[in-house]
Image: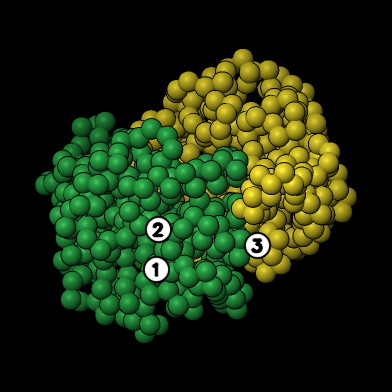
Chain colours: A yellow, B green
Amino acid sequence: MEVGLCLSFCNKRWKNPQALAEFVSSLGVRLVQFSWDLVDPWWKEEIRDELAKEYANAFRQRQIEITVSFSGMAAYAYSSLLSEDERVRKMGMTYLKRAIDMTAIMGIPALGTPAGCMESLEGLQNIGRKKAGIEVQDAGKENHGGYVKRGEVRKRLVDDLILLSRYAAQKGLKQLYLEPTPVQTEIPCTALEAKILMEQLSGKTQIPVGLVLDWGHVLCPSFNEEPADMNYWLSACKGYVGACHIQQCDGKMDRHWGFTGQGIVTPEMIRGVLGNPDASGIAHYLEYCPAFETPGEEVVKEIRNSVKYLQLI
Amino acid sequence: MEVGLCLSFCNKRWKNPQALAEFVSSLGVRLVQFSWDLVDPWWKEEIRDELAKEYANAFRQRQIEITVSFSGMAAYAYSSLLSEDERVRKMGMTYLKRAIDMTAIMGIPALGTPAGCMESLEGLQNIGRKKAGIEVQDAGKENHGGYVKRGEVRKRLVDDLILLSRYAAQKGLKQLYLEPTPVQTEIPCTALEAKILMEQLSGKTQIPVGLVLDWGHVLCPSFNEEPADMNYWLSACKGYVGACHIQQCDGKMDRHWGFTGQGIVTPEMIRGVLGNPDASGIAHYLEYCPAFETPGEEVVKEIRNSVKYLQLI
């Protein structure tokens, strides 16, 4: 298979654009997703854009295509577009617009990110209420985990994404992506919710909003009894999936392991997805996230061997 | 023991100041460290400061003291003051000054953070050079892991911290803290390096720069054959340690587990440190970092039980 690469493995390690592009090139990788953990969208425009262009140029010089500009660990800390607090959502929009500016300057056609996070469904106060036998669950599968009104939050998200798509279109972007996660405080976190969200957005945004599916997220235990299965998700979200993140994992947690160790993602499982017509034309990007303490040499070895492993499938 | 709390456990879960302060109060906890993952120092001043003050007021109303304002997951993604790139260091300084502004507005007397990170000692290019038998190690224990000139980077860090301490003093802060980590690309990552850094800073900064030691970091395998032992670090860094982060761990990786499960941090080990005169007056803060997928209810239970466990020691 053709394997692209997320630059998550660089975190706290490698930030030199030339060395990084050379390394990626040496792996025979031709597609990468840029990470905002390398250049912070909040940084002062002149410095930010200069640094961002250095990465874009270094990759381009080596005929590596940066297909998507993707949020990283730093962005993931904040509630962003799913916050209950209007002020935090406003900061989320400002941040994403700055990320769009940076993405446009780099000549990258698409931007991807998870949407943010809501207050936990098991709120600090709810714990007491649950103990007291008070029912805090909303009815229906779609409102799994209840209490927070997912439908309302999603409607607000749709409105924000319509605005954001207008801004992105003005800046020359062609595509936005959301990434479903295995976290119940995020939207979407099930295939059903992803599909509903996509349908609500469809035709209303200036540029299309699609999905990036992550194998490890999909394979985590489901919140609504859907199969934790890539082919199920690809079918449920048919027409909306633009790319996949691939990782080795155990189907219990969102591991982001490389492929040299044990895990449930087998070559057979991968071939079964690649052969699925619903996956046709969808690029796969290895997203390996080592612990910060893992020695650099080990990370390089894991990336090399994992890319080779996937390329041979 | 008196146990304080780092607010790391709130990440992606609980951001409501009132609910959070009420929960912390219900644990019998009277000391907390604020996290920049709750309010981003980059946010627009009016919104940022308004949100930050809501947290400060909510805790203060419940007689909970916020002793330190500490960087979190988002800040940790970037190279900051240890970058080789002057532009990135400049953004690191801007960011930390903004964090100082927010800390001052909240009426918190101290700010703490790791310093940033350098390019990995096993650089992407070095891998090839090492394979070719080229020696890339610097001599001497202090330069463990070699290639990057740690001494030079540290000297630059000292200069930056002198400037930063001046700014912090102007804003009314009384103390800055650095946190040693078990990551070789960071400074300091050994007790020896921490001590050298503290001595280089001593007397030169407008307000003192001290250390926050993390049990799990200290118990990770050492980079320079020092004992991975809290009493050793407390003795080596005597006079500089202002607070400790405490976590359950396995002595292999930086786990940030709670105390309900297995680990090498035993009540005996804790008592041995609390009874050490070098630890006298140093407050301990539980720093539990659950995976994002961990259900909220489980996180609440882990925090409750871990705090109770430590309070009984």
Q: Which circle marks residue A92 in the picture?
A: 3
Mark toward the start of the polypeptide (1 vs 2): 2
In the rendered structure, which amino acid carries the disc numbered 3? Gly
Give the chain of mark 1. Answer: B
Q: Chain of mark 2?
A: B
At 86% from the left and 48% from the top, the residue drawn is A200
Marks 2/3: CA–CA distance: 31 Å
- The tally of labels here is 3
Q: Are marks 3 and 1 on the same chain?
A: no
Give the residue type at disc 2.
Gly
What's the residue at 54%, 25% (across, down)? A250
Question: Height in image: B102 above or below A200?
Answer: below
Q: Position of residue B84 (x, y in %)?
A: 33, 59
Q: Which residue is mark 1?
A: B67
Picture quadrant where residue B265 is located: top left
Question: In the image shown, does B31 or B146 lie closer to the viewer?
Answer: B31
Q: Residue furthest left?
A: B140
- Disc number at residue B4? 2
Q: Give the mark toward the camera: 2 or 3.
A: 2
Say which chain tag 3 marks: A
Quadrant containing the N terminus of chain B in the rendered view:
bottom left
Residue that appears at 74% across and 47% down: A134
CB atoms of marks 1 and 2 within 8 Å: yes
